Amino acid sequence: MRLAVWLEATRPQTLPAAAAPVLVGAALAFGRGAFHGLAVLAALVGALLIQIGTNYANDYFDHLKGADTEHRLGPRRATQAGLVTPSAMKRAFVVVFALAIVVGAYLVARAGWPIALVGLSAVLAGVVYTGGPYPLGYNGLGDVFVWIFFGPVAVGGTVYVQALDLTALDLVVGGAFGLLSTAILAVNNLRDADTDREVGKRTLAVRFGKGFARAEYAVCLALALALPLVLAGLVGRWALFSVVVLVPWAALLARRVRVREGVELNPLLGATGRFLVAYAVLFAIGWLA
C-alpha cells in the first residue's frame, strides 16, 4: 500500500507530457541520421524523473500553502490526505530531482554545457512552479512554463543530445507538443478555478474566467493539429497528414471540456494525455515515412 501511495503521487496521467516529446525528438534525429539510443533513453528517464519530482514538489508546496484542502476536486494528494508527511514528501522530491541530475550528467558529458543549463533550469522551474516567493503556478505563469519546458525545450533538448546540433524546425515541432501539454494544464486549472480563487492561486482560469480556460484548451488542440499540415506542405512530408484522423477525437474532447464542471473534468486529464501520446506516435511515424 505504501508503494501504491507513492505511485499515485507521481500523477501518472501527467507523465505522457514528459515522454511524448522525447519520442518525437528521437524521430526528428533519426530522420537526419543522428539517432543515439542511449542518449534517448537517458533523456526519457531524466524527463520522467523531472516530471515526477515536480509533481512531488507540487504535492508538498500546495499543502504547505493551504491550496490543497478537503474540498479539493482533483485526484487525491498524498500530503493533504495525510498519507505522507510533509517532511517525507520534501525528501522525496529532493531525491528524485537528484536522480534526474545524476542521469543528466551523462547527457552533459555527451552534449556539453547547454544541456547542463537546460537540465538545471528544468529542475529549478519544477520547484518554483509552486514553491518559492513567487510561484509560477500561483501567478498565471504556469501555462508559459509548461509550453516552454514540455515543448521546445523537451523536443529540442532530445534532438540536441543525439545530433549535437539544433534547428529552428526542431523548436517549431516542439511548440506543438508544448501546446498539448498546456491543454492538460488548462483542464486542471478549469476544474480547480473556484477553489484556487479562494486560496489566492491566480491561474489563467482564475484571472480571465472559465470561458478563457475552455477556449485555451480548444485553441491548443487546434493549433497542434494544424502544425503538421503546415509542415507537410513546407518540407514535403505528406505522411504527416495522418494526424487528421485525430480531429474527431480532438473535437469530442473540446466539447466535453466545454460542458463539464468540477470533478467531471478529471477523466479528461487522462484522456488528453492519451491524445498527446497518439499525436506523438502519428507524428513520429509520419515524419519517418
Image (cartoon, helix red, strand yellow):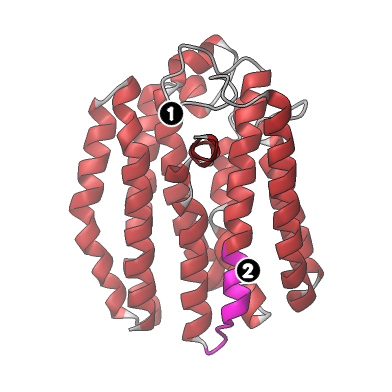
Q: Is residue 43 magenta?
A: yes
Query: Residue 188, position in %: x, y?
Result: 44, 31
Taking depth in this image into account, of 44 and 34 the one nearest to the observer is 44
Query: Residue 106, position in %: x, y?
Result: 74, 71
Residue labelled with disc 2:
42
Q: Circle 1 — which element?
A: loop
Where residue 157 sits, quadrant-wise, is bottom right
Question: From which residue to which does the magenta span run?
Answer: 33-44
Query: Residue 133, position in %: x, y?
Result: 77, 25
In the figure, 199 relative to 206: above or below?
above
Residue labelled with disc 1:
75
Instruction: Name the quadrant of the C terminus.
Output: bottom left
Q: Does the magenta stretch include residue 37?
A: yes
The residue at the point 62 percent across, 24 percent down is 62
Q: Which of marks 2 and 1 is nearer the N terminus?
A: 2
Q: Can residue 139 be seen in this view?
A: no
Viewed as shown, does residue 199 lie left or right of 90?
left
Q: Circle 2 — which element?
A: helix
Q: What residue type is labelled 1?
A: Pro
Where residue 210 sits, quadrant-wise, is top left
